[in-house]
Image (tube, rainbow, N blue to C red):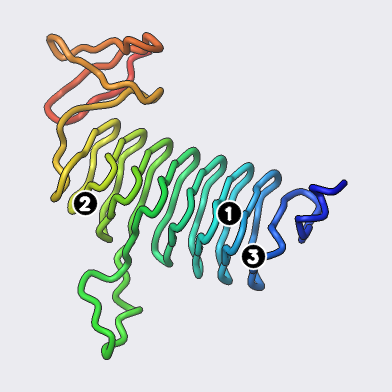
């Protein structure tokens, strides 16, 4: 009972820490937990079983899928969509205007950013707006993404470069004759040019 008193229950089926703010017209799915000092702005939609860390800002009008994990100090702005099972590491950065100026209002020039199912964004990585990160792609810590990333792609560096591919379980893949078998989970993949797909 002592631990439960630290939480402010806004709805029976999800938890919000008493230090956080939830604006009007927000949808939050069953089992989601929102921790200290976070703010969910109006019009945002958060799915089921998400874990939202400390000092996170979401919205307005952001879309978060199911089972998404957002670590501390991340802002998900309008125009950013995170599909199911996305992981956002601590202090990673999303943008939504390509050429901002303080004295010029450009909110009607937002460029959408789409993070597809299962992708990982590493700590302190920056995702420049207007691009798509493919399913189960892996963006390394500190990378700066300035182009689309293919499904399962591994991107490192500044600017980010595609240097390989990752299994959906998070293990790096090694291809031979356009085929790869994950050393950890034994899933199999085929590769054509810079596109790979699971074949099991």
Is label 1 in a helix, a strand or a loop? strand
Looking at the rendered structure, the secondary structure element under dot 3 is loop
Q: Position of residue 25 (x, y in %)?
A: 65, 70
Q: Are marks 1 and 2 in contact (CB under 8 Å)?
A: no
Query: Residue 46's mark?
Result: 1
Of labels 3 and 2, earlier in sequence is 3
Tell which tag, 3 or 1, sits nearer the viewer.
3
Residue that appears at 24% across and 77% down: 100
Classed neighbour count for the residue bearing mark 2: other residues with Cα under 10 Å, few (<14), some (14–19), many (≥20): many
Residue 180 occupies which quadrant of the picture? Answer: top left
Badge 3 or badge 1: first in the primary sequence: 3
Please report the residue visible at 31 percent of the width from the left and 40 percent of the height from the top: 134
Q: Which mark sits nearer the N-terminus, 1 or 2? A: 1
133 w.r.t. 175: above or below? below
Q: What residue is disc 3 on?
A: 20
Locate the C terminus by quadrant.
top left
Which residue matches tag 2?
144
View extreme (bottom): residue = 103
Distance between mark 1 and mark 2 Cα atoms? 26 Å
Image marks 3 and 1: residues in contact by CB distance under 8 Å: no
Dots 3, 2 in contact, CB < 8 A: no
Q: CA distance from mark 3 to mark 2?
A: 30 Å
Q: Is residue 26 left or right of residue 172?
A: right
Q: Is 34 on the left-hand or right-hand side of 121?
A: right
Please say if 134 is above or below 70: above
Q: Nearer the viewer, mark 1 or mark 2?
A: 2
Q: Quadrant of residue 79?
A: bottom left
For residue 176, above or below residue 20:
above
For the residue pair 28 and 52, the one nearer the viewer reads as 52
The local crowd at label 1, few if under 14, some if 14 to 19, many if 20 or more residues have their Cα within 10 Å, is: many
Q: Is residue 142 left or right of residue 176?
A: right
Residue at the (18%, 28%) spot, across then down:
164
């Amino acid at each position: 009972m002592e631990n439960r008193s630290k939480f402010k229950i806004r709805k029976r089926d999800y938890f919000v820490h008493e230090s956080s703010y939830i604006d009007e017209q927000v949808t939050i799915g069953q089992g989601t937990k929102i921790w200290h000092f976070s703010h969910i702005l109006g019009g945002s939609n958060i799915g089921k079983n998400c874990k939202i860390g400390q000092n996170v800002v979401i919205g307005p009008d952001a879309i978060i899928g199911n089972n998404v994990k957002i670590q501390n100090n991340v802002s998900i702005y309008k125009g950013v969509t995170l599909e199911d099972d996305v992981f956002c590491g601590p202090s990673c950065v999303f943008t939504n205007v390509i050429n901002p100026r303080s004295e010029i209002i450009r909110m009607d020039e937002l460029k959408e950013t789409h993070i597809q199912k299962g992708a990982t964004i590493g700590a302190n990585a920056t995702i420049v707006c207007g691009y798509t990160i493919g399913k189960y792609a892996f963006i390394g810590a500190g990378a700066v993404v300035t182009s689309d990333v293919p499904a399962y792609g591994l991107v490192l560096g500044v600017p980010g470069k595609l240097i390989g591919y990752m299994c959906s379980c998070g293990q790096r893949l090694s291809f031979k004759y356009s085929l790869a078998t994950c050393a950890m989970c034994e899933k199999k993949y085929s590769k054509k040019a810079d596109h790979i797909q699971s074949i099991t």
